[in-house]
């Protein structure tokens, strides 16, 4: 079940761009908060909207804080993100064209998320994961093509507390079975469709989260935001690491130190 969710999250992120214009035109009411506009249809309870606003604003602060963005005056949140709430699963699926298992989808380039009340995993997984993508991309640039997929998915999945805290034991288990992907194998993955079997997908996401966890928590915390700033300036991940983490020359060195850390 967990694996299914991991893969489905990755897929919804990439499937979602084409329908938003259609969904926009369709009689939504709106409610605004500091960083979000919630669009919802008749039939959605008001306290559900209040709950979404409270949770999304909480995640906004937590994610910006996790990534160290709040501490820097170069952090800029340009426009509110939009969350669209359909009254039920049937109307959500009908209007977004998403498959039966999808509890929500997002276009982080457009800072838009679509869902419906009671979607499984929405508050704990989908919302923090997709906001992780949106907040990271707002920071480094939506057009930036220098970011390895494992790095961005690691950042998004790190925002899901359950994935973050499970990642260490998962990668230790994969390590003991000699199943970890090398840094070259991780970096070769350009889209989730490149991952051909379920076990590799599970390994890919667990490693990505664990490496990000290591990078954020085992060095001076302000460096991670500086690393992202360097990525924003169009440096490759290797160049950005070299400029901002004095003892990490490149992603291979990061991987080597992460592996050593796992073994201690
Ligand atoms: Zn993702």
Image (cartoon, grey):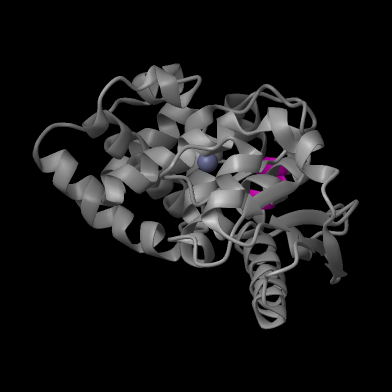
Q: Is residue 116 left or right of residue 142?
A: left
Give the residue drawn at x 32%, y 33%. Answer: 201
Q: Main secondary structure of the magenta part?
A: helix
Point out the image quarter for the C terminus.
bottom left
> How far across and down, in percent of the image, does residue 144 sit?
74, 26
Q: Where 195 falls versus 245 (above or below)?
A: above
Please name the residue shown 25% across and 24% down the image: 197
Magenta includes 226? yes
Q: Residue furthest bottom?
A: 47
Q: Nearer the viewer, residue 35 or 165?
A: 35
Q: Report x, y in % for residue 221.
A: 60, 60
Magenta stretch bounds = 224-228
Residue 141 appears in the figure = no
| Residue reaching furthest to the left | 177
On screen, residue 262 versus residue 62, left or right, reads left
The residue at 58%/58% (across/down) is 127
Q: Quadrant of residue 181?
A: top left
Whether residue 184 can be seen here? yes
On screen, residue 226 above or below 54: above
Give left or right: position of 86 versus 206. Answer: right
The quarter of the displayed image where residue 19 is located: top right
Left or right: 82 in relation to 3: right
| Image coords of residue 44 (percent x, y) | 67, 70
Please identify the quarter of the rendering in which residue 58 is found. bottom right
Residue in the image at 48% along x and 29% along y = 251
């Amino acid at each position: 079940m967990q694996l299914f969710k991991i893969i489905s999250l990755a897929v919804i992120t990439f499937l979602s761009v084409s329908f938003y214009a259609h969904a926009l035109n369709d009689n939504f009411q709106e409610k605004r908060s500091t960083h979000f506009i919630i669009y919802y249809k008749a039939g959605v309870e008001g306290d559900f909207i209040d709950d979404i606003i409270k949770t999304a604003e909480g995640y906004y602060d937590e994610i910006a804080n996790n990534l160290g963005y709040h501490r820097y005056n170069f952090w800029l949140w340009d426009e509110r993100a939009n969350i669209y709430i359909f009254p039920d699963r049937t109307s959500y699926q009908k209007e977004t064209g998403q498959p039966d298992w999808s509890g929500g989808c997002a276009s982080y380039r457009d800072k838009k998320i679509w869902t419906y009340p009671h979607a499984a995993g929405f508050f704990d997984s989908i919302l923090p994961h997709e906001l992780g993508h949106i907040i990271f991309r707002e920071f480094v640039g939506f057009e930036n093509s220098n970011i390895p997929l494992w790095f961005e998915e690691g950042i998004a999945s790190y925002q899901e507390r359950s994935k973050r805290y499970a990642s260490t034991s998962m990668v230790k288990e994969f390590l003991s079975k000699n199943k970890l992907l090398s840094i070259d194998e991780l970096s070769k993955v350009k889209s989730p469709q490149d991952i051909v079997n379920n076990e590799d997908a599970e390994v890919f996401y667990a490693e990505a989260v664990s490496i990000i966890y290591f990078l954020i928590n085992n060095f001076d915390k302000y460096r991670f935001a500086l690393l992202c700033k360097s990525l924003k300036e169009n440096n490759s991940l290797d160049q950005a690491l070299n400029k901002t983490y004095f003892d990490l020359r490149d992603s291979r060195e990061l991987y080597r130190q992460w592996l050593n850390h796992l073994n201690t």
